[in-house]
Amino acid sequence: MDREALAEAMIPLIGRLYRENGVVTSVHGRSLINQSVVGILKAHRFARQIDEVELPLEDTLPLLEALKDLNPGPASIDIARMNARYKEFGQGREITDFLREELSDIAGLHGSDDRTSRDVVLYGFGRIGRLLARILIEHSGGGHGLRLRAIVVRKGSDQDLIKRASLLRRDSVHGPFEGTITVDEANNTILANGTLIQVIYSADPASVDYTGYGIDNAIVVDNTGRWRDEQGLSQHLKCPGVSRVLLTAPGKGDLKNIVHGINHDTISDDDTIVTAASCTTNAIVPVLKAINDKYQVVHGHVETVHSFTNDQNLIDNFHSGDRRGRSAALNMVLTETGAAKAVAKALPVLAGKLTGNAIRVPTPDVSMAILNLTLENGTSKDELNTYLREMSLHSELHKQIDFIDSPEVVSTDFVGSRRAGIVDGLATICSGNNSVVYVWYDNEFGYSCQVIRVLEEMAGAHPPAFPRV
């Protein structure tokens, strides 16, 4: 009961920091925004998987109170990591004094958010499009940064708007939408938690005048996968009100394939079209970079065990691709993946060193990549796991790599993970210079979080994160 009372006291602080200051609080990457008392307790208990002890609410409540007193500007603050830093470097100081020094860049900057707001249009509203919408709506509390303004779809029926809103409201994998949704059929809009989304019907990416809807200088996120080269995607740039395009699939030709955390710093203002690579590429590249930096990968094979997708048939029917015509719900389907080759676009040092294959399996979400690697510098299971765990906590890749060593986890435990990939430490195998690393990944939500990070980079809308790495 005492712990519940502490959690109840935290809720208004978390809410006010988010709405009034634009501060997003989390526990090891698990957002505390809009969490219930039980959700906050679970987030604090989760910390024991990282720090080996449960995060005490007696520590975090004073931290949040002191944070509010600082009247900070927008930021992303991990209170678990900040608490650990205070215990290590606080040197007996008051928590407010410590935070004022740690957060000197944002202390007292309430109301002075200098981030530019950027209009976002989702072209296509399938699995990834709807998850991107959920995340964008979730991040819209301060009114700055990315602003979801419209979705563009082909009209499927007279009830199209109602059905689109229903699919946003209910999701068989990720659960119900956290909030309220109102549909205005007269104006073709969806109001979701105060975010007004214009629904535009068009089958031609080059024919929409977005300025007619008050949209300007927008980034169009193409979720259809129909066009993957510069020629096809540049059709969006012909529309008034559009300035840049982001593809949620691997791009072809010379388009930059961006994996956030790895090569996002290569995005320049001249890049009008950028791609966010694939879910598998995003899952494996951060782990491969971490391993290569210390142990040097000589060569390796990537085998992905991937949940089925809408591209496959529910029951046996004709399909232009090999084997994909067979029932996705009844079969393991051996198919190809371009992820191994795509790694080189984000991490050129591994060019020509990897092969890859894929098996589609009868699960709706969460996949696994098995990295079978030959290393120049041999290692042990304990050493490699300790290193990857440290990378997930204290490196610049902590938003991409997660680590777990529970003997009971299965695929559904990773639904909703915001990391690109999660290393399963108990499954790691090391023998001399050969190592096998198993990486779970939510190929829908985890990938969507990576897309949002790239989108924020393109828009210059990412708030500073604390504590600094």
Image (cartoon, rainbow, N blue to C red):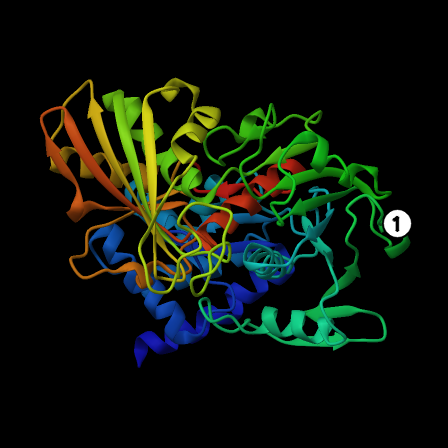
At which x and y percent is residue 390?
27, 38
Farthest-out residue, front:
318
Confirm whether residue 55 shows in the render.
Answer: no
Position of residue 168 in the picture relative to residue 421 (left or right): right
At which x and y percent is residue 383?
14, 33
Residue drawn at x 39%, y 68% as measured from the top left: 40
Residue drawn at x 71%, y 36% as measured from the top left: 232
Count neighbours of disc 1 (C-alpha within 10 A) and say few if under 14, some if 14 to 19, many if 20 or more: some
Quadrant occupied by the N terminus: bottom left
Amino acid type for the residue under numbered disc 1: Thr
The image quadrant of residue 53 is bottom left
Considering only vertical position in the picture, is 169 above or below 464? below
Q: Is 339 in front, or is 91? A: 339
At which x and y percent is residue 329?
37, 64
Considering only vertical position in the picture, is 42 above or below 127? below
Position of residue 5 in the picture relative to residue 277 (left or right): left
Residue drawn at x 15%, y 48% as measured from the top left: 426
Farthest-out residue, right:
212
Considering only vertical position in the picture, is 342 above or below 363? above
Badge 1 element: helix
The image quadrant of residue 341 is top left
Q: Which residue is mark 1?
A: 211
Quadrant occupied by the C terminus: top left
The image quadrant of residue 125 is bottom right
Position of residue 41 in the picture relative to residue 178 (left or right): left
Farthest-out residue, bottom:
1
Confirm whether residue 112 shows in the render.
Answer: yes
Q: Is 282 in front, or is 362? A: 362
Q: Is 405 in front, or is 125? A: 125
At which x and y percent is residue 132?
58, 55
Residue drawn at x 9%, y 25% as measured from the top left: 432
